[in-house]
Amino acid sequence: MVHAPHGYQRAPLPLARETEPEPPTVAQAPPRPDTANPQASAPGAKKQRNALFDNAKFLAIVLVAMAHAWEPIMDGSRTTRALYMFVYTFHMPAFIIISGYFSRSFDMRPDRLRRLVTGVVVPYVIFETAYSLYEKWGNNDPGHEISLLDPYFLTWFLIALFIWRLTTPIWLNLRYPMTLSLVIAVLASVTPNIGDDLDLQRVLQFLPFFVLGLKLKPEHFQLVQRRGARPVAVLVMLVTLVFAYWAAPRMTLNWFYRGTSAQQLGVDWWEGVVMTLGLTVCGLVLTACFLALVPRGKTWFTALGAGTLCGYLLHGLLIKTIEYAGLVDDYGWLKSPLGEVFATLFMAAAVTLFCTPPVRRVMRFATEPEMKWAFRSDPVQNAREREREKVPA
């Protein structure tokens, strides 16, 4: 099995809840009128999920899983490497922007802090431990240590979301939050001594996307969903794919992971500045194109958008199982064009299964635990719930 390059071991993938500032895959709409869904704003009405975001999250997690499937088999295939670079340019920015959008109403209210703990911190602790133990035993690596300060593989996004969300009130109160977040991202890209703790290099370099999500409004998503935007989105994506094909043999993949500084990649500091700004712009443009092409109405996979946290975390275990078992080395045909198609379809089907409601229910103890026993009762929240129950349906 070909081992992933440095940076891929902490490769992304992640998610936002459509239920207020919630954990990473089921986002709730903020408590402000939603012009895209007026029924959700009616007094006493049950909050409605926005199909656009569920569709976007599911399609993004499928792209994530497919890219991870390409990682060990793309050597020697310029086309697959170009597709990998193309997907890695925007799949994380898309997730992070959506996460920021559904974090707009986050404050230090007790019920929201509890959801932050149960929906982000607890899954991080459980899966950071699980991935580390699997690496230690499954990969016969006794030297690998469990460290909650050094996220392993996919778990970096959970700790990043925790940090971003805790700082939400600060970003919402700043006069120029986007400018400051971009300055921080650029400085991080040329600061090699940040270290591995909490994967802060990634947290800081991806920060502008989260801050942008905090500043977006429903009408911004309606803008990219206009009919005329779709042909433009297709054209831009095709041009980007052509460019990615040209750049595939010339560009190191570590730029896309955002986990290292320019100096650590062996280039001048100014190249880090240029690449950070360039990839940020490309990520924003391709995310807008992606959202323009996402169906806005309900589809067969809309309901699966609520389970993308399970898909995110469980597909990583499958990727690691394939790696530890050495299946790519044992079955060399997987590196052929037919094998690449098979691996793509297999991983897309697997992550779809992981997002289904039955799997989500089974994994709820780890991804969405209630943990009422761990928190003190909040009289204010209890009163709100009693009042809500009195409202006729």
Image: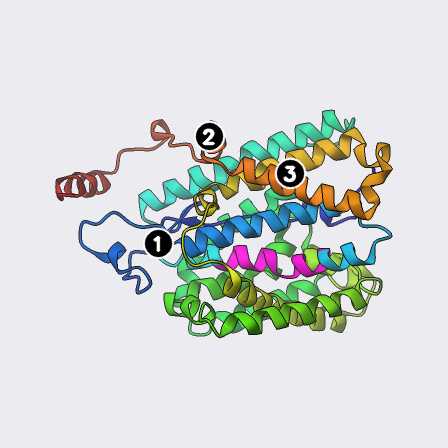
Q: Residues within 10 Å of mark 3 (few under 14, many from 20)?
A: many
Q: Is 11 rendered above or below residue 136?
A: below
Residue at x 21% of width, y 38% of height: 382
Of callouts 1 and 3, which one flags the residue occurring earlier in the amino acid sequence?
1
Quick check: 153 left or right of 308? right
Q: Which residue is mark 3?
A: 316
Going from N to C along the chain, the mark reached first, 1 or 2, is: 1
Q: Secondary structure at mark 1?
A: loop
Please check the rendered image and state whether residue 87 is part of the magenta-colored stretch, yes or no. Answer: yes
Quarter holding the C terminus is top left
Whether the residues at callouts 3 and 2 have beta carbons within 8 Å, the answer is: no
Q: Is residue 260 visible?
A: no
What's under tag 1, amino acid-wise?
Ala
Predominant SS along the magenta part: helix
Q: Is residue 158 left or right of residue 140?
A: left
Q: Residue at x 57, y 74 (%)?
A: 232
In this rendering, the label closer to the viewer, 1 or 2: 2
Percent x, y of residue 45: 21, 50
Q: In the drawing, what numbered circle is on residue 358? A: 2
Q: CA distance from mark 3 to mark 2?
A: 19 Å
- In the image, the segment drawn in magenta is 84-97
Query: Are the two marked residues, 1 and 2, in contact with CB atoms closer than 8 angstroms?
Result: no
x, y percent for residue 172: 40, 65
Alpha carbon distance from label 1 to label 3: 28 Å
**Pointer 1: what residue?**
29
Name the amino acid, label 3. Gly
SS at badge 2 = helix
Q: Residue at x 72, y 55 (%)?
A: 84
Residue 105 image point, x, y percent: 35, 57
Q: Amino acid at mark 2?
A: Pro
